[in-house]
Structure formats: C-alpha cells, structure tokens
Amino acid sequence: MGTRDVILDAAAQVMAERGLANVTTRQIARAAGFTEAALYKHFANKADLLVAVIRERSPGFGELAQALRGGSGLEDDLTAVARAAIDFYRDGFPMFASIFADPSTLSVHKEELRQQGAGPHKANDGVAAYLRAAQEAGLVRKDADVRAAAGLLLGACFQHAFLSHMSAPGPRDDGEAAAAFVRTLLESLTA
C-alpha cells in the first residue's frame, strides 16, 4: 500500500473518530505514521484530503458510481443506485455535519469541490443522465422530468439515511426502502 493510501485510510479513521472539525493534518499524519510534509506531498490542504476521503474511502460512493453505469435493467439499476446512496449518505453524515458546523471549513470545502469539478450535485446529474438515456431508449416516458425524478430518488435516500441516525430503525430495512422508493418513482416515470 502506498503512502497516499495509508494517509487516506488514517484520515478516514481519525475523521470518523473525532469529527472533521476537531482533526488537524498533524493528527492525520501522525496516525498514518508520516510527517505533515508527507501528507502535503499528496494533498494540497485539509479540504483536498477531505474530498479524496469522501471519493475514495466512503462506503457507497464507489457503489453509487458503479450502479450509475447500469446494465441490469431500469428497476434493478435504480435500486442499486438507491441502496448505494443510502449507504453513502448514512456513512457520510458525521463528516458532513462537521463540515457544516464550521463556516470556514465549509467555505474551503465548497471552493475545493468547485475547483475539482466535484460536489453533491454530481450524484443528481448522474441519476438524471441515466434516466435521460432510459428515456431516449423508450423505457421512461418522454414527458418525464428526469432531473426532478433524480432529486426525488436521492432525496428519499438522504431522508432515510438521516432518519436512521435520528431514531430507531423504521419498519423497512435499507434494501426494502430502496426498492420501495424506486417502485414508487417508476410508477410516475413509465407508461
């Protein structure tokens, strides 16, 4: 495992344990067994490291990207997207909360995302593009608003993940919830 991967693993662990706002690059470097100078050879700043942790170490992010590639059929693909989104949102909430808790960290993070052409809107863009392709293939009604559909699906997943942090488990597990969200959405998208 290379230095960059060791740093990412250590950053993900330290951020999960202490919260982003309470973590310094020195603590991350120490946990990785390197100097801060080694950390800065791979990451421009703490925000750059955070973006890399979210992209490369967040459970669900890779699965979400994979699910958006499709290939299993409309309902199965969207259910995989929903399931991955639930995992990503649930696992990311502690880190997201830390980002929003500190206005300066949020500002730096938003600028870093802008510079990298990244951000939470990319998931919506990806789902909308998938649905647009399904629309062009005749699987989704021509008059369906695919951007709104993407927002509804991901919003339901976000809410489900949020509620899992705030209350006892609901009547549905994550897989059942993902499938139900997709079935309900498809009722409005398909003929």
Image (cartoon, helix red, strand yellow):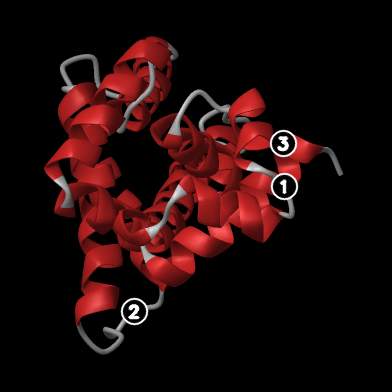
Marks 2 and 3, Cα distance to the nearest angstrom? Answer: 39 Å
138 relative position to 7: left or right: left
138 relative position to 13: left or right: left
Q: Judge by depth and name the residue closer to the eye, 130 or 41.
A: 41
Q: Residue at x 46, y 44 (%)?
A: 81
Marks 1 and 3, Cα distance to the nearest angstrom? Answer: 10 Å
- Looking at the picture, does residue 22 appear above or below residue 185? below
Residue 157 spot, x, y in % from top left: 29, 55
Using the rendered image of the protein, determine whether residue 191 is visible from the camera's viewpoint. Answer: no
Q: Residue at x 30, y 16 (%)?
A: 114
Which element type, helix, strand or loop, lies under badge 2? loop
Q: Judge by depth and name the residue closer to the eye, 154 or 178.
A: 154
- Looking at the picture, does residue 69 appear above or below residue 151? above
Q: Judge by depth and name the residue closer to the eye, 40 or 114.
A: 40
Marks 2 and 1, Cα distance to the nearest angstrom? Answer: 44 Å
Q: Amino acid at mark 2?
A: Arg
Q: Judge by depth and name the residue closer to the eye, 121 or 170.
A: 121
User: Can you tell which of label 1 and label 3 is closer to the viewer?
Assistant: 1
Q: Name the disc covering residue 26, or none.
A: none
The residue labelled by disc 3 is: 4
Q: Earlier in the sequence, mark 2 or mark 3?
A: 3
Q: Amino acid at mark 1?
A: Phe
User: Can you tell which of label 2 and label 1 is closer to the viewer?
Assistant: 1
Classify mark 3: residues with Cα within 10 Å, few (<14), some (14-19) or many (20+). Answer: some
Q: Amino acid at mark 3?
A: Arg
Residue 40 spot, x, y in % from top left: 59, 29
The residue labelled by disc 1 is: 34
Classify mark 1: residues with Cα within 10 Å, few (<14), some (14-19) or many (20+). Answer: some
Q: Name the disc covering residue 172, or none.
A: 2
Which element type, helix, strand or loop, lies under badge 1? loop
User: Can you tell which of label 2 and label 3 is closer to the viewer?
Assistant: 3
Quadrant for the C terminus in the image: top left
